[in-house]
């Protein structure tokens, strides 16, 4: 029987830094379960109000649990992260935080919504829906829950402490709604052991996370960590996910991470061209044309400055 390791919610850190000692060492292919607080690091609770936003200590936000040292992982390798299960708390929150979000200049009033989350009694549905939450029951506005970890990443090779707020080529706060149960994330390893960390539970989120927050929630998430030696083309997060509409099909996604939204987009396409060449032996020209006629270009995260995904 394979070993399943458990990480407690207090085993966390607030920067990506390859000098942070690992809290656990695992063999490639082993499974780890993480108990994670929400992105407020426990500062918001089910009884919080909009007034609570003013007292948030921003230096304590977006903590991640880890780091996990994966034996055999070396710079130039790829860490495969299989998302085996994601479970939320019974509540969550969404906030408008002054100065944060795509339309921050238009929404200056602190606002907080506390959600009650309703998981399906039988677990995930065939369509991958975990449950639902009412945005406004009287008006019939209901949100499907498809939980995921907004933060998944490995330590950058560049020395020093790097904020957990933005995303990087090594992952981090990628806020990609498609990294749900059953998906697989590929991360480029830049430091020995990879030093994987995870956090920022989201019960539901739209592409872009435009107001700056999703349905933020504590979560329990289980992943399998495997070192790959044959995917040197993975230079930014890549992932495989299934259709959100219950169809039996998978999507392979490449990402671009940049402080310029157009350059992030261009990078994502370049990485897909490289992937198609490496895995399907297409010429660059063939791959580029295929991207144009069959690709689905999305923005995953547009608020965690200074980088976009």
Image: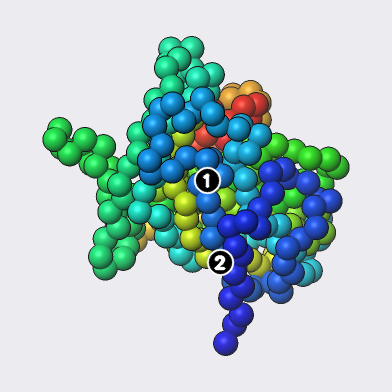
Left or right side of 240 for 161: right
**100 over 68 or under it: above or below:** above
What is the secondary structure assignment of the residue under circle 1? loop
The residue at which mark 2 appears reads as 33
Residue 273, image x, y percentages: 61, 43
* Camera sees residue 62: yes
What is the secondary structure assignment of the residue under circle 2? strand
Residue sitting at 72 percent across and 67 percent down?
Answer: 24
Residue sitting at 66 percent across and 58 percent down?
Answer: 11
Looking at the picture, tell me which residue is in the foreground, 140 or 52: 52
The residue at which mark 1 appears reads as 42
Rendering quarter of residue 228: bottom right
**14 over 184 or under it: above or below:** above
Left or right side of 195 for 176: left
Locate the C terminus and report the quarter of the image it occupies.
top right
Left or right side of 89 for 262: right
Looking at the picture, tell me which residue is in the foreground, 132 or 54: 54
Looking at the picture, tell me which residue is in the foreground, 27 or 212: 212
Q: Going from the N terminus, do you reach mark 1 or mark 2 first?
A: 2
CA separation, marks 1 and 2?
Answer: 19 Å
Looking at the picture, tell me which residue is in the foreground, 106 or 171: 106
Residue sitting at 57 percent across and 87 percent down?
Answer: 1
Residue 172, image x, y percentages: 63, 44
């Amino acid at each position: 029987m394979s070993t399943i390791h458990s990480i407690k919610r207090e085993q966390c850190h607030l920067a990506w830094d390859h000098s942070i000692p690992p809290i656990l060492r695992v063999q490639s292919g082993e499974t780890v379960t993480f108990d994670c607080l929400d992105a407020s690091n426990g500062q918001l609770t089910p009884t919080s109000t909009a007034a609570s936003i003013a007292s948030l200590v921003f230096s304590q936000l977006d903590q991640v649990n880890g780091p996990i040292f994966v034996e055999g992982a070396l710079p130039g390798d790829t860490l495969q992260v299989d998302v085996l299960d994601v479970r939320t708390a019974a509540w969550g929150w969404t906030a408008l935080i002054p100065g944060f979000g795509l339309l921050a200049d238009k929404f200056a009033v602190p606002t907080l919504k506390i959600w009650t989350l309703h998981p399906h009694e039988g677990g995930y549905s065939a369509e991958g829906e975990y449950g639902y939450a009412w945005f406004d029951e009287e008006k019939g506005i209901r949100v499907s829950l498809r939980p995921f970890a907004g933060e998944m990443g490995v330590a950058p090779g560049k020395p020093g402490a790097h904020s957990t707020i933005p995303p990087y080529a090594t992952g981090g706060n990628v806020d990609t709604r498609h990294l749900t149960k059953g998906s697989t994330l590929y991360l480029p390893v830049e430091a020995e052991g990879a030093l994987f960390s995870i956090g920022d539970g989201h019960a539901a989120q739209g592409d872009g996370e435009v107001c700056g927050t999703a349905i933020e929630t504590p979560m329990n998430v289980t992943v399998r960590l495997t070192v790959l030696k044959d995917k040197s083309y993975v230079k930014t997060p890549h992932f495989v996910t299934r259709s959100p509409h219950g169809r039996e099909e998978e999507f392979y996604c490449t990402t671009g991470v940049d402080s310029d939204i157009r350059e992030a987009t261009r990078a994502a396409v370049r990485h897909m061209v490289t992937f198609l060449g490496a895995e399907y032996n297409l010429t660059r020209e063939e791959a580029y044309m295929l991207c144009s006629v069959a690709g689905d270009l999305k923005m995953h995260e547009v608020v965690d400055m200074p980088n976009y995904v």
